[in-house]
Image (cartoon, coloured by chain):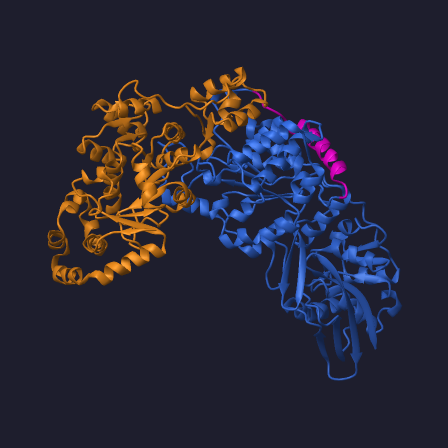
Chain colours: A orange, B blue
Amino acid sequence: MTSRACDSCLRRTWLLGRLSGHLDVERKRIWELLELGDDALITALAGRSAPAVHAQFVAFGPDAAARARERALGRGVSLICACDPGYPGRLRELAAPPAVLHVMGGIERLLRLCGQDPVAVVGARKASAYGTGVAWSLAGDLGRSGVTVVSGMAAGVDTAAHCGALDVGAGTVAVLPGPADREYPRSSAFVHRRIVREGVTVSEIALDTPVRNWMFAARNRLIAGLSCATVVVQATARSGSLLTARAGQWLQRPIGAVPGQVTSQLSAGPNQLLADGAAMIRGAQDVLDLLYGVGSRSVVVDRRPDPTPRQALLLRAIASGLDTAGALAGADLADIRWLAELAALELAGRVRRGPGGRLSVVP
Amino acid sequence: MLARVTTFAIDGVEPRRVCVEVDIRPGLPAFTIVGLGDAAVRESRERIRSAVLNSGFEFPQRRITANLAPASLRKAGPGFDVAMALALLAASGQLPADALSHVAVFGELSLSGELRDSAGALAVAEGASRCGLRKLVVPAGRAREAALVDGIEVLGVSTLRTAVDAVTGRRLPGLPAPAVALQSPPEPDLGEVRGHAVPLLAIEIAAAGGHNLLLEGPPGTGKTMLARRLPSILPSLTRTEAIEVTRIHSVAGLHHDGLVSGRPFRAPHHTVSAAGLVGGGSTPRPGEATLAHLGVLFMDELSEFQRGAVEALRQPLEDGRVSIVRGQHALVFPTRFMLVAATNPCPCGYAGIAERCTCGEADLRRHQRRISGPLLDRIDLLVSVQRPSDAELRAGSVTDSRAALARVTEARERQRRRLAGSGASCNGEMDAGALQTRVRLDDGGQRALGDAYLSGMLSARGRHRVVRVAQTIADLDGRNTVTDVDVLLALNFRQRAGGEEVPAA
């Protein structure tokens, strides 16, 4: 556990927490606000209480900073600030790099993972089975190929991406909206524990600060900032994942998108990105081509056993849209034994069962 | 002068012997009842006075004391009226006292002297038979029910006057016709179901192995329709079981004549309280879990049930009985039922269909939290019920109840033989010990189970659930050894961690 954060950077972090409510009111232009210096930020947001906030700000001295470091140490959170030479270089390219990175899982591990050409895999919370399936296998293949997966630990695509990487034994970076030790959202608590064991969670927010809406947009710029490329899996037209993509565009880093059915709202985001010139991502190979140029590295494939003819039939049926066991039963597969084949496919990692028992083929 | 007669109080669903003593002494006219009776017992003074006079007997104008012994047992309800009236007549010399020595008396009086139906006659008859009494006087309307108990002569009478005639032997009422199993209205049949091949298989497995079942699916897909058809494929009650069910239903006042033949199907509304579900009240009454004893308890919209009510089901599910403690007194109600629950996958019901589901993440989480973890732990089978396709709706039915019942009966017989002496009567009741000793997996089965466990599909408990279900599938197929196909089939009905498709860590 290390503390590599200077007093003034800790004071900036404290200020964001102090002004959290004000920032939330102005969250439409959060990226601009975060670019402001400390004094300008207080003047712009605090209104009548500006003098009081300023006084508190000035009073935040070495003692308070030492207390903040101590508290972080006590919770197993490491700190590294922008003044430290080891601070991830890619983040510095942001217009408003975070003053202090709060890291759970160790700074060394974060830096190692950041050195493995991280790729952001982000997407909708309410993803379909297709979305989570693609995210899971994409992250798994990237992990096997030595590329770090960065995401936001939200439900749906983000969690699937983290798990995909962890399932093949690769580390992963989760950039959290709230404090680094806060299991947000609660439904992803067990993913949080897994990530802290084998990867890192990162945040720019001071410990114990309640999660507010502005933090999501602020977090999304960090996901793009840490990554060499950003891939959007599923997103509605108003999704926050598109903010991540926009931050990536601003940083002039490659953007990729996984195409989806044109009839689905969840495809609106990625399909629009594709129309605007984003790279088409059909699998991990496309991501590697995007990162290193076509043909320079190839994906490390896993050796799954070939499906039996009957399993192949099932896979085709599921891929064609018969995505529930009931629908499959209604098709020509009247023999009940195919249900066993279905579970065998699941065991082999070729089929996944999503919310409501919906099936999807794992690419 | 003092007279005694035996009657029975219903304590929960069990009969307790009560000795009614009536003593008549010279003094100012008064009628006192002692012995921890409730308001209905206190009011019986007025009923007895009018009934005695209206039946043409004399009501003694002296000091009358009636005691219901044991005095420590709380007594509720009007079922002691006739016993007290007969004891009073004996004490006042209008009836030979020895006429009451081997008789149990049970029933409520009306002011005119007629006997009214009272709930619980079967329990009383069982009590009387157990105490070695030879005759039982009950209201005529309950005679057939009481006559289900062997070894006791049931005297069904309709007035106080005929009751006196019956106990003195002056004129015996006609013996009640032997109670035949009631012809229950035909149960809904599986043959009426179109499509739903997978849920039908799950229901058959649940019935064959006595597994608890959770049906999950969007609104209007047929979850309730399927659950209502489950009793039609459960093996019929044995006579002992039928008498047990009849006794409970008779005590609860749900049943009026003859023997209950079909397995109970109870579907309490989701607003039911904990006491309504497992039994309770100041004088504890059986709850829905007890009324569903040896049948099916169906909880539709599981997530809407009050937390307390659902949690209260844990003991009944675990032990097959529930004990309710009131003050110094504990009551035990039997609760061996099959739990069938139905729920939407999310508040709007369309989880997994991204375009239709309008639930936020917080809604989903709240919904999942509402479904109690410990309860899910007792549910072996989870099946998702989806809208059948047009072709399925037009096609014929997949199976019908008669064929399914035959398969279920055979599978149950096989289990009974294999599980003899293990404390479990069906696969759903097997505990970890029985799973170890009574289930044999072949190599393929072991491998499939191990693969599923290693891949994170199953928790340790989930593994037990899958083995139980796999064993039932093998039983349905007429085999004792569990193969890989059985395990794989069973895996289809496993629970998924919160509906999130992330392998559990």
Q: Quadrant of residue B82?
A: bottom right
Residue A128 locus on image (x, y percent): 38, 31
Q: Quadrant of the N terminus of chain B?
A: bottom right
Residue A11 locus on image (x, y percent): 20, 55
Residue plotted at (24% across, 26% down): A272
Question: Left or right: B89 with respect to A83?
Answer: right
Q: Is residue A168 above or below residue B174?
A: above
Question: Left or right: A220 with respect to A343?
Answer: left
Q: Quadrant of residue A110?
A: top left
Determine if residue A283 is in view.
no
Determine if residue B400 is in view.
yes
Residue A168 locus on image (x, y percent): 43, 32
- Judged from this view, the residue extending furthest toward the top is A309
Q: Is residue A241 above or below residue A4?
A: above
Query: Does B402 lie within the magenta span?
Result: yes
Q: Is residue A227 above or below residue B100?
A: above
- Judged from this view, the residue extending furthest toward the front is A85
Front one among A298 and A141: A298
Residue plotted at (28% across, 54% down): A209
Query: Does B58 lie within the magenta span?
Result: no
Front one among A34 and B384: A34
Q: Is residue A111 above or below residue B85?
A: above
Question: Left or right: B68 with respect to B301?
Answer: right
Magenta range is B396-421
Residue B51 locus on image (x, y percent): 73, 66
Number of on-image labels: 0
User: Magenta region's main secondary structure?
Assistant: helix
